[in-house]
């Protein structure tokens, strides 16, 4: 996907850690020398202190395909969280406990 496909004001999905969150492009910082284009994003519903510059590799369009990827990631995180909860309640090996 060409980096110029995202524009200011566009709602997007952004990878953060292991999750994908709703966000909005607030500014586009063009490529300079060897640095790729960066996008200043604001995570929807979060304080501005969470705003950050991200490369295009962390962004997805907020369309049917992007929302499907987000749903898959959300489901995988939910399954993983349930497994971790079971381990903490005594379902795991002794070596797994802190």
Image: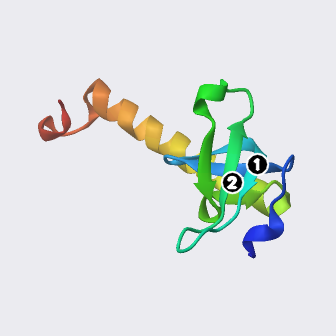
Among the two numbered marks 2 and 1 on one chain, the one whose residue lies closer to the N terminus: 1
Q: Which residue is mark 1?
A: 27
* Residue found at x 38% / y 30%: 85
Residue 68 visible in the snapshot:
no
**Based on the displayed image, in which of its 4 quarters is residue 38 positioned?**
bottom right
Figure quadrant of the N terminus: bottom right
Q: Position of residue 24 (x, y in %)?
A: 78, 43
The answer to which of 27 and 68 lies nearer the viewer is: 27
Q: Is residue 53 left or right of residue 86?
A: right
Task: Choose between 36 and 24: the one closer to the eye.
Answer: 36
Q: Quarter holding the C terminus?
A: top left
Q: Is residue 36 visible?
A: yes
Answer with the quarter of the image where residue 44 lies.
top right
Instruction: Return the residue at label 2.
Output: 39
Residue placed furthest toward the front: 33
Horizontal and vertical percent position of residue 36: 60, 68
Instruction: Answer above or below: position of 77 versus 85.
Output: below
Frontmost residue, 70 versus 33: 33
59 vs 7, left or right, is left
Task: Decide which of 15, 33 is in the foreground and name it.
Answer: 33
Q: Exactly how many numbered labels are in the figure?
A: 2
Asked if the residue under mark 1 is in contact with the one under mark 2, i.e. CB atoms within 8 Å, the reply is yes
- Residue 50 image point, x, y percent: 59, 32
The label shown at residue 69 is none
Is residue 66 positioned above or below 51 on the image?
Answer: below
Q: CA distance from mark 2 to mark 1?
A: 6 Å
Residue at 55% across / 68% down in the picture? 35
């Amino acid at each position: 996907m060409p980096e110029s496909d995202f524009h200011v004001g566009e709602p997007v999905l952004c990878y953060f850690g292991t999750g994908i969150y709703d966000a909005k492009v607030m500014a586009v910082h063009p490529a300079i020398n060897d640095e790729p284009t960066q996008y200043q994003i604001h995570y929807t519903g979060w304080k501005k202190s969470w705003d950050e510059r991200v490369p295009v590799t962390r962004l997805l369009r907020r369309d049917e395909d992007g929302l499907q990827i987000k749903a898959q990631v959300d489901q995988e995180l939910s399954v993983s969280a349930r497994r971790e909860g079971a381990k903490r309640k005594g379902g795991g090996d002794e070596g797994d406990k802190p």
